[in-house]
Image (tube, rainbow, N blue to C red):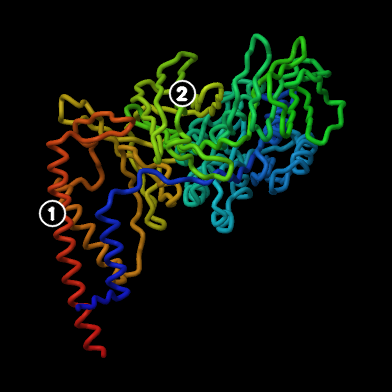
Amino acid sequence: MFEFHITPRVSAALFIIMMAVSQPAISLALSNQMDIRVLIDVSGSMKKTDPNNLRIPALQVLTQVLPTGTKAGVWQFANTPTVIVPLGTVDAKWQQKASIAAQNISSTGQFTDIGAALKAASFSAQDQLQGRQLHVILLTDGMVDVSKDVAENKRARRALLEPILQQYINSGARVHTIGLSHDADEATLSAMAQRTDGLYEVAVNADQLLDIFLRALDNTIITQQVPVKRSEQSFVVQQGVESMTIVVEKNGDEQIKLKDGKQRILGQQQDLSDQQWQSSSTHDVIIIKNPTPGTWALISDTATLKRINVVGQLQILLQQSHQNIKVGQRSYLDVQLANEQGQLLSAEQLQGFQLEVTMNHADKEVFKKQQLFLEDEKTRMHLPVLNDPGLYDLTISVTNGELLRTINRSLRVHPLVAIKQTVSTQQNTTLMPVTQELNVLTETSPDPISQTEVLVVSNETASAELKALMEGQNTTFIASELTEPKTAASKVAKLVNKLKNKVISPAKTSLVIPEAKVKVKENRGNVQASQPEAASSDYWRWLFVGVAGLVLLFLFVILRRTSKSVR
């Protein structure tokens, strides 16, 4: 009998080769736990752009609809940033403190130091270790303004878009920027959002603030909603809903009441243990635990139901490949269903569930598709190639009979802009010019049939978390090479990667990865290569496996001899 002993070095080499040979993971399961930090501009110019201080009720509603267990905090900034709602875990007490603290927002500052605000709210290494998704929501109406000296303002803007923003990119955090009026520095705010794959939007006036705040929140948190019958101001609560959050726009009605599933009347004056009612100058937010199943309705002549968020036994796990793409790029959604313990539903439990995605642009429906959930794997919905720049609204619906849950998301399509790159000599990191958006160089594919545009996107050095979110796009990032310790395992990995690149990619494309020119067919949401090309791919794959095996055998013999000589 032969005994085969694998040394630790050989074991590491085997693991690396197997990882290199195997297909890369399409997407990663992301935690639904969030860490959200809100930054509110209180510079003097806000008196003009927000004369009625509508930031206060908008912020109050935002903090009330945050899910329990979320980590959150609020800062205001002008000359210097100040904490107005301490960073903490969201619960009823935190929400009550936030509602009161928001009333202290004023507009007395002279300057607008966005960089200092981002520094104050930055994420630490400990924040990253907690495994939460990291997000910032920033509201401002102006430019980067730290001094009356123009040169100093330019330096502050460059610092904001390079080292300060780079820290957010390294931590995998998304920055969602909101410009109040078109007087805001839209180029800077757009670049901040695009580089971190966050949402960017402009509120023409303060009346739009709440809707944009909620849209930013929808792009941050997987918020399940039930549809509202606008004509009747009613909605249906089904069995199994653990809690719901109702947002009502008062429109002057200070005596709002609700009719529950058993036709009982609920109001703010009632002191019920399972009811939390927060009121602002413009909206009411009502949180009800274990709501009675049935049809609920709003009782008011002027007020309107804005949204109904629900938490129940069904969990929807959603991963959006991109929130920012260029014209001609593809994106997709991965959706899975789980029970209240987070256990994925089995094939039998998935029977009857259907996924529907609708996309609207400029109040016009541009895409709608339905498909059944796949068994025991992620259900992927490919979104169409979009040729018109702008903001697209996505509605993701999960249905099963009378059960209906919706999730809202946004997707911004950016135009193709060819500009020059600038390279920072510090830390050998490729960075973008601070005066323009994320740049894209394009060239037309020589294949007249595909008419595919090849994109080269300059990008800062991103963290593993952010790179995972950007998987699947037809672009490659230019970034400085990370230095690794030259261990035996790393040498084997480097050698294997070189062999793999030579075998699979004979053409030398150091910065450009053309879109694969293969004929595809849809099979229950999965894309497969045609048979002749699949056979060719298998040939090269097995050739690579054979070469890798020879390399492994060679290394094993050397290491075996080395170990014997040591003895």
Q: Are marks 2 and 1 in contact (CB under 8 Å)?
A: no
Rendering coords of residue 508 (x, y %): 17, 47
Q: Which mark is residue 543?
A: 1
| Dot 1 alpha-carbon crowd within 10 angstroms: few under 14, some 14 to 19, many 20 or more | some
Quadrant housing the C terminus: bottom left
Q: Which residue is mark 2?
A: 392
* Closer to the camera in the image, 541 or 153: 541
Rendering coords of residue 145 (x, y %): 60, 38
Q: Is residue 314 visible?
A: yes
Rendering coords of residue 277 (x, y %): 79, 30
Where on the picture, by quarter, is residue 523? top left
Quadrant housing the N terminus: bottom left
Give the mark, 2 or 1, whose residue is nearer the N terminus. 2
Q: Is residue 79 visible?
A: no
Residue drawn at (30%, 66%), measured in percent from left and top? Answer: 490
Residue drawn at (37%, 32%), measured in percent from left and top? Answer: 331
Left or right position of 469 against 549: right
Q: Which mark is residue 333?
A: none
Instruction: Tell me the amino acid under the disc marked 2.
Output: Tyr
Left or right position of 246 against 337: right
Left or right position of 415 against 191: left
